[in-house]
Amino acid sequence: MLFRSTTTEAGFVTRLSVDGSHILYSTFVGANFDSSVNALALDQQGNVFIAGGGQVQATPGAYQRPPSGCPPVFGFGFSTFTLSNDDAFILKLSPGSSAPLFLAAIGGACQDYINHIALDSAGNIWATGRTLSSDFPTVAPLPNLGSASSAAGFLVALDPSGSTLI
């Protein structure tokens, strides 16, 4: 089920009992009901990793992009349109609670979304997605071909604590 109105949508995560008979926890993800949840992974300890995009605020100690605004990207008549500054996010929840262990916000000045995540044997979180940000954060980057007017794919890795891009 997805909450929808004419202008907003909300991502959410719900954990059911093994037999599906009752809800163990359920929570919205993101702020102002403007987020999407696109990917989910579990680690060996039962922690839940959720990824997507939206207007999110990182938890203390988690990776957070510097605040900036998305420049206007195109005009139509007398109007100039600006993309929102939605960030890609990775949220880690403990096995028995919807309280976040961390929420990392990854992105540049414009829209960034994660579409897929996976965990490696060291506990690093790997994610792929798309960005419209020419200033998307990079570590040992290939040439950044993205701009505010064209989408670029990305691959990021986040350390197990959620604090550092690797």
Image: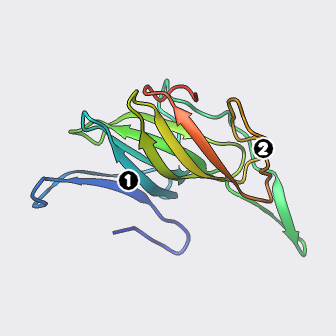
* SS category of the residue bearing label 1: strand
Left or right: residue 158 versus residue 27 is right
Q: Which residue is mark 1?
A: 28
Quarter of the view holding residue 10: bottom left
Q: Amino acid at mark 2?
A: Asn
Badge 1: how crowded within 10 Å, few (<14), some, or many (20+)?
some
Q: Residue at x 13, y 53 (%)?
A: 17
Q: Choose between 78 and 65: the one closer to the eye.
A: 65
Q: Which circle marks residue 3 in the picture?
A: none
Q: Choose between 82 and 150: the one closer to the eye.
A: 150
Q: Residue at x 48, y 58 (%)?
A: 36
Marked residue nearer the N-terminal end (1 or 2): 1
Q: Amino acid at mark 1?
A: Phe
Left or right: residue 156 versus residue 140 is left
Q: Residue at x 55, y 39 (%)?
A: 105
* SS category of the residue bearing label 2: loop
Furthest toward the front, the residue is 121
Q: Is residue 163 visible?
A: yes
Left or right: residue 56 versus residue 107 is left
Determine the CA span between mark 1 and mark 2.
33 Å
Q: Residue at x 78, y 43 (%)?
A: 144
Q: Are marks 1 and 2 in contact (CB under 8 Å)?
A: no
> Where does residue 46 sit, x and y in percent of width and height?
25, 38
> Where does residue 87 sit, x and y in percent of width and height?
60, 47
Q: Is 110 above or below relative to 105? A: below
Q: Is residue 31 visible?
A: no
> Where does residue 89 sit, x and y in percent of width and height?
52, 44
Q: Which circle marks residue 144 in the picture?
A: 2
Left or right: residue 142 versus residue 16 is right
